[in-house]
Image (cartoon, rainbow, N blue to C red):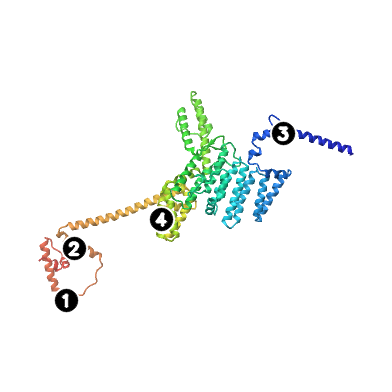
Amino acid sequence: MNRTTVLNRKLVYLVILLAMVVPLYMLGQPSGGTGDSGGQLAEMRNKFNIAESDLGEISPASETMKLASLGLRGVAATLLWNKAHHYKVLHEWDRLKATLNNIALLQPHFDKVWEHQAHNLAYNVSTEFDDYRQRYEMVREGTEFLSKGVRQNRNAPRLVWYTGWFYGNKMGMADEKTQFRKLFSDDEPLHESLMEQGIAVDSPDARGPYFKPDNWLVGRLWLFHGYEIVDSGVKIRRQTPLNFFETGPKWRIKHAEAIESEGVLDDRAQSAWQLASAGWREFGERSVPTTSPFTIKLGRLDELVRLQALRVEELEKILGQSDLNWNSYAELMDFAKKADPKVRLQAIELAGEIVDLEERKKKTDGYRKQINYPYWDTLSLAEQEERTVKARRLIFEAEKANEAAELDNAISLYEEAFGIWAEIFDDYPILTIDDSAEDLMKSIRRYSIAIDSEELSDDFPLIAFVEMMSNDGGASSEVYETVRETQKRKVEARKKELEAEELERERKAAEEMKKEKADSEKPPAEKADAKPEMKAEKDADKPEPEAKPEPEADGSDKEADKDDKGESKASDDNDSPAEPEVAEEQGEGDAAP
């Protein structure tokens, strides 16, 4: 190989490079250039909204970092991820946060960067601290990291949802939730930052019962911000629409539960439950995309059932049949095809509509069961009643009295609350599977300790609930209804037994009174006849007395005189002779003058 050959090869390479620059220049020409329609790449960026300005805030530091990597951005990001894990293990938190910021600069539009590292800070790193204030700071770092990701990815509803989830779930469900909620409500710098991001923490929708921002309600505002993005046409990625849309309305319910657990048990709690119920019903009217080629509304199941029954009734009239039984689309179409030719087309259309309604009904019912829609609907309805708020207030006051060793007051409050809870469970059996049912069971155990009795009486208002919770099979509304019915039968049987015993006692008492009244109305002669009989009955029941010594001679003469007097008295009063023992019992005082 000589120099001429090498030179020729280099010239060929140079020509090829220059030839490639021309199409690159044409494709990459800015849209504001000399061409009428701009460059091809610029047009594509505008068409698909993938320009940096369309994705979110432009970060000059991020662009500089990408250029500095010289095309090795993937390698640099991998090294930084490993370094972040290393710093986490060594508990070097400042270096960890700096590394996370560098990762975000290299991969600003990779959603998992923001989700994973924010979760890492809020859920994993925060637990490494002993003081709850430091834990709160790390949770706050995680939420702010997510907020930064939202600003740079404004069309990523998953990140917005995740931010709302952090504010509600992490701050409201952690072991330190009481302290976290208090710190959040007083965190004015964070409130100002949220206001700058468009979250109206000063609105009534974000403020709790003490007129301060509540973490559950602020999280709800974040979630509804994500709903607005989806409603504008952005698709939901890496999450089911059902789970995406149900979280916001549920945060209202969690807010009501939280303030009640903190002792807010008055009209403010009732109002919170009313708003939660309205929000859940509104969610039931939202069109939710499904895996089938149609959307559903979770609150319209009864309407689908009613509408299908009407269509079946119409088809039965057309076919001239009653109680039309079908298990598949093919069977129903067979019925429709056998109809009279004049109405066959109408019958086929009705059959198709019935099958479509059946599919929608099954899909709606399945989605309702996935998120337990009927339970949350019933819970919000029951909790907004005044008696439910009163029952919770009584339990709360009873617990405080029990802690203060005021046992009599605690027992009285417990019993009043248990009576109200029994009525609530009878009307809403599904509440027996509520989380608060476990707390109620603990209160019942403390009540048993207070009355110093492990066994509860059969007439205890919540005896069916106690039996259900003691069942190894677990708690469920169906089990409660079964136990309650069994307990009702037992109580009714016991009531009948007590009533029978009471009637028997009343009958015996009436007979005795009747007998006494009859004896009091008898004439004196009949009373005299009745006395020896009664005496004889009494003497028959008594044991025989021991033999007494014989009386002296003088005493026998006196007894003879008494016998003569008794005989004369009996002959004057009655025609029939009297027994000598009667006169002996009456003595001299009863003899006739």
Tell me the residue at 22%/55% (across/down).
Answer: 514
Q: Amino acid at mark 2?
A: Pro
Q: Secondary structure at mark 4?
A: helix
Query: Which of pointers 2 and 3 lies earlier in the amino acid sequence?
Result: 3
The answer to which of 365 and 21 lies nearer the viewer is 21
Q: Which residue is mark 4?
A: 413
- Disc on the earlier residue, 1 or 4: 4
Q: Horizontally, is 504 left or right of 357 in the view?
A: left
Q: Amino acid at mark 4?
A: Leu
In this rendered view, identify the residue nearer to me: 512 or 33. Answer: 33
Foreground mark, 2 or 4?
A: 4
Front-most of 302 and 417? 417
**Would you name the residue on which mark 2 appears?**
532
> What secondary structure is found at the residue carrying circle 1?
loop
| Circle number at residue 552 | 1
- Between disc 2 and disc 3, the foreground one is 3
Q: Earlier in the sequence, mark 1 or mark 3?
A: 3
Q: Separation of disc 1 and disc 4 at Cα?
A: 78 Å
Query: Mark 3 falls on what kind of element?
Result: helix
Question: Between tags 3 and 4, which lies in front?
Answer: 3
